[in-house]
Image (spheres, coloured by chain):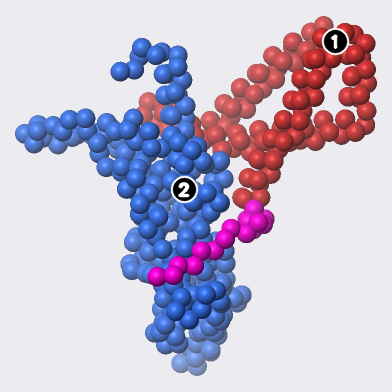
Chain colours: A red, B blue
């Protein structure tokens, strides 16, 4: 028997909405990783002294970098929101023999996110 | 009578994937214009072609009621059971019918399913006991709640739509895949089973659960509401927690 194998096309992720949203979610990690690199450089500049730190802050304030940060924020939001939507698949909680509904699991994730954000905001803004 | 005849004159176009290895090295599409009936499913249309137009068309089917899982095909690019996909949902547009994606094609719409069969057995989908109880001890009992934990994962009809929907399986054919992992998880969650650790050695690998990047399309196309994507994520969570337990409490494991 001579079976015919169909190769996966390069544009497979454009053929279906779910595939597209999935690949976009995977690609958001590139922007988030780049953001982490700038953050780590910021720490190094801070260690190098106040002048180096101030110069780096000016660089981060440039229009291009502002645009990048907005894009990174959008990527992080997209990733978090689509990920929370999938959370009920992985987490099956049972309370008194009944499965906790998916919406509750999603809400708990958002609540945890809010709490962590508030703690971070408090640390950053208290001075 | 007149009304029936006008209805019978309506036609629908089917573009059907053909591959006849003895006469062609590349597949082609053949177009059939056949009578349109509102109560016909795609499988009825294929049977009409086979019976009245072209007896050489090859495809698999059996129960024609969504139980046997053998008539899965790509209908306009989406994996479907053709016995429950109605022509009226596409009419008057043409319908393109192809063999399930990601599998080699044996002939026309029939795929080679050896890989899937091997993977099903690979995950040890049966109740494993460290030591079998003697017959006199009676059956292994289970409460309705215990049954409820895995029941939906046991509803799989092995139709392979989830493999056709999974881009990971298309790109990495070594991936154990949605249905086999869901079946393994069905036994992992069974209160009578003691083979979870043995099975996790097979599942918690790069070709197993960790190849999955959660596209979720397997669950969307599943005709039996098995939720294989959920099974894989739950297996990931169980595997990660097991690893954490081994690292944090090294003396806690035999």
Q: Which chain hosts label 2?
A: B
Q: Residue shown at 69%/14% (left/top)?
A: A119
Q: Position of residue B141 (x, y in %)?
A: 19, 34
Q: Residue shown at 44%/23% (left/top)?
A: B243
Query: Furthest residue to the bottom?
Result: B2
Q: How far is the residue under mark 1 from the one under mark 2?
A: 49 Å
Q: Assign a secondary structure to mark 1.
A: helix
Q: In the rendered structure, which segment of residues is drawn in magenta? A: A1-17
Q: Which residue is mark 1?
A: A48
Query: Furthest residue to the top?
Result: A127
Respond whether the residues carrying marks 1 and 2 are from the same subunit.
Answer: no
Q: Which residue is mark 2?
A: B174
Q: Main secondary structure of the magenta part?
A: loop
Taking A114 as reference, is A44 left or right? right
Q: Assign a secondary structure to mark 2.
A: loop
Bin the neighbour count of mark 1 within 10 Å (Cα to Cα): few under 14, some 14-19, many 20 and up.
few
Bin the neighbour count of mark 2 within 10 Å (Cα to Cα): few under 14, some 14-19, many 20 and up.
some
Q: Quick check: is A7 in the magenta stretch?
A: yes
Viewer-closest of B87 and A17: A17
Q: Is residue B232 visible?
A: no
Q: Quadrant of the C terminus of chain B?
A: top left
């Amino acid at each position: 028997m001579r079976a015919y194998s169909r190769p996966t096309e390069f544009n497979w992720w454009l053929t279906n909405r779910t595939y597209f949203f999935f690949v976009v979610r995977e690609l958001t990690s590139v922007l988030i990783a780049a953001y982490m690199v700038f953050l780590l450089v910021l720490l190094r500049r801070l260690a190098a002294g106040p002048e180096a730190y101030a110069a780096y802050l000016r660089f981060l304030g440039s229009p291009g970098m502002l645009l990048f940060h907005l894009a990174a924020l959008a990527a992080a939001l997209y990733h978090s929101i689509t990920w929370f939507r999938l959370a009920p698949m992985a987490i099956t909680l049972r309370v008194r023999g009944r499965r906790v509904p998916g919406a509750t699991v999603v809400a708990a994730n958002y609540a945890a996110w809010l709490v962590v954000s508030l703690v971070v905001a408090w640390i950053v803004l208290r001075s | 009578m007149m009304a029936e005849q006008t209805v019978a004159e309506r036609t629908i176009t089917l573009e059907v994937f053909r591959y006849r290895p003895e006469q062609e090295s590349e597949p082609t599409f053949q177009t059939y214009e056949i009578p349109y009936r509102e109560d016909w499913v795609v499988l009825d249309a294929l049977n009409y072609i086979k019976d009245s137009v072209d007896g050489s068309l090859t495809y698999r089917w059996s129960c024609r009621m969504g139980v046997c899982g053998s008539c899965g095909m790509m209908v306009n690019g989406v994996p479907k059971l053709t016995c429950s996909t109605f022509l009226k949902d596409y009419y008057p547009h043409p319908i393109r019918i192809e063999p399930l994606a990601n599998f080699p094609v044996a002939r026309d719409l029939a795929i080679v399913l050896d890989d899937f069969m091997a993977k099903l057995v690979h995950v040890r989908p049966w109740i494993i006991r460290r030591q079998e109880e003697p017959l006199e001890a009676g059956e292994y009992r289970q409460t309705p709640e215990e049954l409820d934990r895995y029941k939906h994962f046991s509803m799989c009809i092995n139709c392979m739509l989830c493999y056709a929907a999974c881009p990971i399986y298309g790109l990495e054919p070594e991936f154990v895949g949605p249905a086999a992992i869901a079946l393994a998880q069905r036994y992992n969650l069974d209160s009578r089973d003691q083979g979870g650790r043995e099975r996790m050695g097979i599942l918690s690998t790069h070709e197993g659960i960790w190849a999955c990047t959660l596209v979720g399309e397997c669950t969307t196309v599943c005709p039996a509401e098995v939720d294989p994507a959920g099974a894989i994520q739950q297996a990931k969570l169980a595997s990660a927690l097991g690893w954490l337990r081994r690292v944090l409490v090294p003396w806690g494991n035999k």
